Amino acid sequence: MGMHVRMLCFAGTVCIALGLATAAAGHSLWVLFSCQGILVGLGSGILLYILSPILPEYFPRRSGLAQGTMGTAAALGGMAFTFALPSLLENVGTRATLGILAAFSFVILSVASALALPPRKFERRSSETVGWRAFKSPLFTSLALVNLVHPLTLAIPMAFGPEFAESLGLGVKRAAFLLAMNSGVGIPSRLGAGALADKIGHQNTLMIATGIYAFATWALWLSSALTNSVGLYIGMSVCHGLISGVFNTVMNSVQKELFGDEMYYPKNGALTSIKGVGYVCSLPIAGALVTKVADEYVRGKDFLRLIVYTGVLLTISFACLLNVRRIDAKKVGWKWAR
């Protein structure tokens, strides 16, 4: 089993390195799309969705902190690339930058693949495929909705934040600073959220974070768009930065706790597929909701449909999490730390 996991991870590594390297050598848009888009995306998905579900099994009492540490490392890497890539592009050019990324990714991810561990062994471990009948379970259906709806919203403030900030009258540099602030506060918050989840429960932490995100969207972001208030939007950016990593930090632990060791992987795999649909569809749907006007005429109110859409989805996600908590309490009895 361990060899299978390592081989799959190495296959993902090869996809990423090959995608970046062939994109560096390409001369057309379709080559860039198929290589850097499809191959790198496929490789990243293989690595992320194979290794992340395994992690909670090796840290049963500190799974939140373990996943928070992983999320913090990912955020630090992302911030490092934010500063490194512009410098590389300016000094060595696009092709050389892609080549450097290909070599760097291959070395680092090959080491990670070699160190990958298999799932823990348990007396009973189901390998059945989850079918449509699983949706007859209110618990599974509620979690499926959360895994679809929540990813639809996660990237929206980051992707549309700079443009929205400029619509409020901020310059490009200040808008970029707000985006960097959003990312920056998310680095320590992932670690803190993981540690908090181990104390008060993974379900509780996810509900609190989703509730804060929904409140910030309705009370701060929507009000900012209606009144052109920069201060309210700064508050929204801070809130989003603090809680944006909580979903990926604790969701696997939540599902392991609810499904148990026997059914964890089949059902987590099905829900991960649903989660992937949410991530893929997120930005195209969101982009279609922004009013199309010339850049110099963009105003905060042009984002109203997008903001309301985000708020509605988060409210649905929060309601589903409350239902999951209710079903779980009915099944195992009420416990505060859950």
Image (spheres, helix red, strand yellow):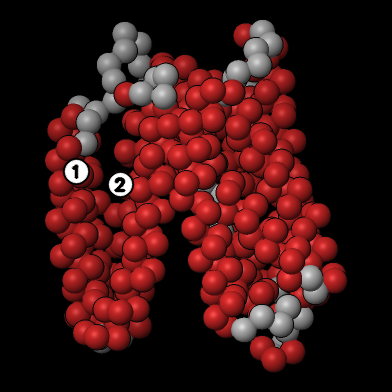
Expressed as whole percent of the image width and height from the top left, the position of residue 284 reads 58, 67
Label 1 secondary element: helix
Q: Quadrant of residue 171?
A: bottom right
Within-10-Å neighbours for mark 2: few <14, some 14–19, many 20+:
many
Provide the residue designation for mark 1.
Answer: 113
Expressed as whole percent of the image width and height from the top left, the position of residue 272 reads 47, 40
- Contact, mark 2 vs mark 1 (Cβ under 8 Å): yes
Give the distance between the C-alpha atoms of the residues marked 2 and 1, in whole angstroms.
9 Å
In the foreground, 195 or 55? 195
Across and down, in percent, residue 191 comes to: 45, 40
SS for dot 2: helix
Q: Give the image location of residue 312, x and y in percent.
A: 76, 51
Q: Amino acid at mark 1?
A: Ser
Q: Would residue 168 appear left or right of 243 to someone viewing this image?
A: right
Q: Which class describes the residues within 10 Å of circle 1: few (<14), some (14-19), or many (20+)? A: many
**Residue holding disc 2:** 47
User: Is residue 244 shown above or below 317?
Assistant: below
Quarter the C terminus occupies: top right
Q: The disc labelled 2 sits on which kind of residue? A: Leu
Instruction: Determine if residue 255 is in view.
Output: no
Left/right placement of residue 215 relative to residue 100 reads right
